[in-house]
Image: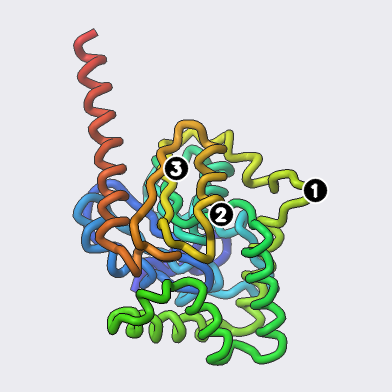
């Protein structure tokens, strides 16, 4: 069970495959198993490193109980160094995508490529209300079955929940959510709300800073995500002019759960396209 000491915190991660490193950052309050359905395909093309961010899973909690997207991003940058790499492909989904975007802004030298799936760098009113309501519900009822059900209803599609596989995944998601203490989960929500609130119709700082991203970038989302709508992925895509945008059919909010083959193929194709581009550039240089 590997751990790395990063910025004064012990961070847990799991490694599969060989090749260029691909860091996998999960969504809100969930651990490295978030990507377990996609790892077999992705680890055939890269060395996947699935992470429990600070405060989640087997990684250490902060004693002061404060978290931020910036701190999580700094942790990943330091983890890359601790593992002996100069840089890595960075894949984040949902909140993990926010962390990945922050990493690309704050530590561009650590990011070989950026892959943001169902991500956000700002919140529309609906998403802000959803996260704020979670805080109020937790204050009244804690991290019980009610809040787990509420979250499951938003992050999985009705069609998926009707399937036998969907019900198995739902049970796993509910258990994963409930492993967070109320205090820690509320602190995570505080971090999201600080990150993404729009003020006076202006973009929050992370969205405004995306123009600094130089790494090759893939922005992906599902065509039926009723929680984090495609418009928020398109905000990221439009703010990074050189980025590629892909919609995953039927992927829900977490395509790595509802459409793992499709989203993993998109990630693998993107990484392989970068390798092909480098080979072509080397060949052109040799000819000149």
Give the x, y percent position of residue 128: 67, 64
In primary-sequence order, the first of circles 1 and 2 is 2
Badge 3 density bin: few <14, some 14–19, many ≥20, Cα 10 Å: many
Q: Is residue 59 visible?
A: no
The image's mark for residue 120 is 2
Percent x, y of residue 214? 49, 33
Name the image quarter holding the N terminus. bottom left
Residue at image location 65% in from the left, 40% down from the top = 208
In front of the other: 222 or 5: 222
Q: Quadrant of residue 209?
A: top right
Q: Residues within 10 Å of mark 1 (few under 14, many from 20)?
A: few
- How many other residues sit within 10 Å of disc 2, few (<14), some (14-19) or many (≥20)? many
Q: What is the number of the mark on residue 111?
A: 3
* Quadrant including the C terminus: top left
> Of tags 1 and 2, which is closer to the observer?
1
Q: Which residue in the structure is indicated by mark 1?
A: 200
Q: Image height check: is 239 above or below 5?
A: above
Q: Work out whether residue 178 can be spotted.
A: yes
- 60 lies left or right of 192: left
Q: Is residue 140 above or below residue 166?
A: below
First in sequence, mark 3 or 2: give its number: 3
Q: Label 3 to label 2, Cα distance in Å?
A: 18 Å
Where disc 1 sits, the SS reads: loop
Q: Image point 45% across, 65% down: which residue?
A: 253
Label 1 and label 3: CA atoms lie apart by 32 Å
Q: CA distance from mark 1 to mark 2?
A: 18 Å
* Way the structure is coloured: rainbow
Q: Residue at x 48, y 71 (%)?
A: 155
The image shows residue 149 at horizontal and vertical percentages of 51, 85
């Amino acid at each position: 069970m590997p751990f790395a000491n990063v910025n004064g915190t012990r961070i847990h991660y799991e490694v599969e495959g060989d090749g260029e490193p691909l860091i996998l950052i999960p969504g809100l309050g969930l651990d490295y198993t978030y990507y377990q359905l996609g790892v077999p395909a992705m680890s055939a093309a890269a060395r996947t490193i699935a992470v429990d961010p600070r405060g989640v899973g087997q990684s250490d909690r902060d004693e002061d109980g404060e978290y931020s997207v910036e701190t999580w991003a700094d942790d990943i940058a330091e983890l890359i160094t601790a593992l002996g790499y100069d840089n890595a492909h960075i894949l984040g989904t949902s909140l993990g995508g926010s962390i990945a975007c922050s990493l690309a802004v704050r530590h561009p030298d650590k990011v070989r490529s950026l892959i943001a799936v169902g991500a956000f760098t700002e919140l529309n009113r609906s998403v802000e209300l959803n996260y704020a309501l979670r805080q109020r519900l937790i204050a009244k009822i804690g991290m019980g079955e009610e809040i787990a059900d509420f979250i499951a209803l938003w992050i999985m599609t009705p069609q998926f929940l009707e399937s036998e596989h969907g019900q198995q995944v739902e049970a796993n998601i509910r258990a994963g959510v409930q492993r967070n203490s109320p205090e820690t989960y509320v602190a995570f929500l505080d971090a999201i709300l600080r990150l993404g609130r729009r003020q006076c119709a202006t973009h929050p700082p992370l969205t405004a800073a995306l123009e600094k991203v130089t790494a090759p970038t893939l922005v992906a989302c599902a065509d039926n995500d009723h929680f984090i709508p495609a418009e928020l992925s398109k905000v990221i895509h439009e703010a990074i002019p050189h980025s590629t945008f892909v919609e995953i059919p039927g992927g829900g909010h977490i395509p790595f759960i509802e459409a793992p083959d499709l989203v993993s193929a998109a990630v693998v194709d993107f990484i392989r396209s970068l390798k092909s581009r480098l080979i072509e550039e080397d060949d052109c240089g040799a000819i000149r």
